Amino acid sequence: MKVFILAGEPSGDKLGGALMAGLKQLTPSVSFAGIGGEMMQQQGLQSMFPMAELSVMGLVEVLPKYRHLKRRIAETAAVVLAQKPDVLITIDSPDFSLRVAKLVKEKSSIRTVHYVAPTVWAWREGRAAKMAKVIDHVLALFPFEPPYMEAAGMACDFVGHPVVAEPQASAEDAAAFRAEIGILDRAPLILALPGSRRGEVSRLTDTFGQALVPVLAQRPNARVVIPAAAPVAELVKAQCRHWPGDPVVLDPNSLSLEQALQRKRAAFRAADVALAASGTVSLELAAANTPMIIAYDMNWLSRQIISRMLKVDTVTLVNLVAESRTVPEFLGADCEPDKIAGGILDVIADPSAQQDAMQLTMERLGQGQQDPGLRAAQAVLNRL
């Protein structure tokens, strides 16, 4: 069985790695080609080009790289058509993935599977109908998504979210981490997570740093830890150099992948509160039972356009899956240091408000059930 699989950012690489592992377990003779990061490469993928070239987010941010992305789209589609795989699996990154699928469908009958349903329940509901022209089958991360995809004409399976299968640090791991960075037992440990893309980090780090000034003024014994994503670790170090409180930056590039993951998990478990950019990191925090505040802003023009399209009153996945609004959000015009600081201090004072929502989120995403990567692989094979 030949599979062409592509991902465009770290979260997609994680999904791809788990799916590839599941396919190898169910079909040992499977072979892979495509585009991916370290986790997909660990499963045997030789990436056509660095996945980081595709990690672009925001309407305005894409424009300067449009010609390069367009060339990569054409190159990728040409390789798929030449190799004639049994299935093309695209993972998230729709600006790239669906354009590749479109070119492939125009010239072949290769089966197309897209992993991660578009958030049509949040904005741009017309995307599902447009996607159905080039995608045969969708693998959904959230249990409420299949009806949207099926109504547009695509097969869809809820396969669970990979966060529920990820290992979690123990209390001993957390204690060892706190001791390693020299934090007192009862002193607050604050995680800061300004994103995994260069644009996010550049936009959010100053705001996050300013928000921490009044927090550390009231909680002078608190310590800030910044788990950086590998592609932006050096940028994070540079951007956070002037943050208050001598923050600890966790650079995964100086460690093996497993060592980096273990250290990140320990930091998540040890933290009392997290200030995070919007995205799947909220689910990682929920899995670690770490209360959070979500803050996010975009390029001004992107913000104006997208804010007018939103159909939901929250973008935080814990709030959406648990059907609650317990995680505080500071988005767009509200992404201001003083407001964020107040949210952090409130959660430090009473972290219990989010506990039920985090637990319910994990249950609804498949905690305790079959591994999502294996479920995804079985869903692909069942419909071939």
Image (cartoon, rainbow, N blue to C red):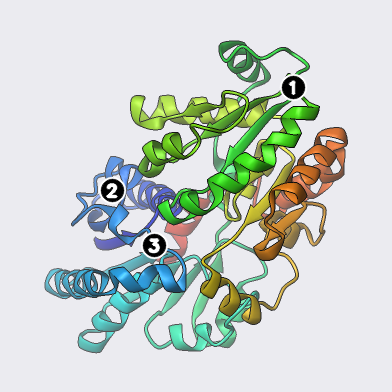
Q: Amino acid at mark 1?
A: Pro
Residue at 75% in and 34% down: 215
Viewer can see residue 287: yes
Q: Is residue 326 rendered to the left or right of residue 107?
A: right
Q: Amino acid at mark 3?
A: Val
Mark positioned earlier in the residue sequence (2 or 1): 2
User: Disc 2 vs disc 3: which is toward the camera?
Assistant: 3
Image quadrant where residue 100 sits? bottom left
Identify the secondary structure beneath mark 1. Answer: loop
In this rendering, is residue 120 above or below 14? below
Which residue is more in the foreground, 153 or 233? 233
Residue located beneath label 1 in the image: 220
Identify the secondary structure beneath mark 2. Answer: loop
Which residue is more in the foreground, 148 or 173? 173
Which residue is more in the foreground, 175 or 202? 202
Q: Is residue 204 rendered to the left or right of residue 135?
A: right
Viewer can see residue 289: no
Residue located beneath label 2 in the image: 28
Residue 49: image location, x then y, percent: 20, 55
Residue located beneath label 3 in the image: 56
Label 2 to label 1: alpha-carbon separation? 55 Å
Q: Amino acid at mark 2?
A: Pro
In this rendering, is residue 21 above or below 278? above
**Mark 1 and mark 3 in contact (Cβ < 8 Å)?**
no
Label 2 to label 3: alpha-carbon separation? 34 Å
Mark positioned earlier in the residue sequence (2 or 3): 2
What crowding class fits label 3: few (fewer than 14 Cα within 10 Å), some (14-19), or many (20 or more)? many
